[in-house]
Structure formats: structure tokens, C-alpha cells
Image: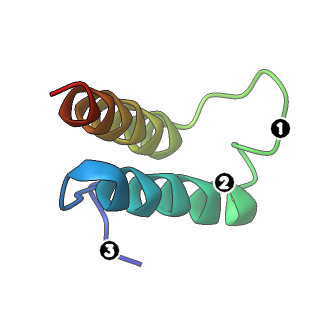
Amino acid sequence: MAGGGECTGGASGAKEAWRAAIEHAAGCPACRTPGAVCETGEQLLSAYEEAARLARSEQDL
């Protein structure tokens, strides 16, 4: 899996970012532990949120 949560933009970019976050969380003990903090998981989730915002703004145009 590529790191950094990079995506291509639009709805497909949001889907790719979501998939990256989910795949990371599935294999990360910290992400699966309630109350634990995972910096990589947080970065991937932030990348997804940004991609989803961009996809929504493109739909509004």
C-alpha cells in the first residue's frame, strides 16, 4: 500500500483515501485499540476527509 494518503481527487480520490485508511486500520493494533492514538491512522483519515470535501465541492459546481 502506498503511504501518505495521496489521492487523485474527486470521488475516486475519496474512495482511494478511504480504502487506504481502512486497510491501515485493519492491520494496525493501535487503530483497533479503543483510546489508542495512531499517527499514521490520523494522517490517513485526514487525507480522506480532505478528499471527501474536495469531491463534495466539485459536485456543487
Residue 52 percent coordinates (x, y): 37, 36
Q: Are marks 1 and 3 in contact (CB under 8 Å)?
A: no
Q: In which image quadrant can residue 50 be found?
A: top left
The residue lying at 71 percent from left, 43 percent from top is 30
The residue lying at 85 percent from left, 28 percent from top is 34
Residue mark closest to the camera, 2 vs 1: 2
According to the image, label 1 marks what residue?
33
Q: Of 20 and 57, which appears nearest the observer?
A: 57
- 28 to the left or right of 14: right
- Vertical comparison of 52 with 22: above or below: above
- 33 to the left or right of 49: right
Q: In which image quadrant can residue 58 be found?
A: top left
According to the image, label 3 marks what residue?
2
Label whose residue precedes the other's in the sequence (1 or 3)? 3
Residue 16 percent coordinates (x, y): 41, 63
The residue lying at 52 percent from left, 43 percent from top is 41
Q: Of 41 and 61, which appears nearest the observer?
A: 61
Residue 10 percent coordinates (x, y): 25, 50
Amino acid type, label 1: Thr
The kind of secondary structure element at disc 1 is: loop
- Vertical comparison of 32 with 20: above or below: above
Amino acid type, label 3: Ala
Tag of residue 25: 2
Per the model, the C-alpha gap separating discs 2 and 1 is 10 Å
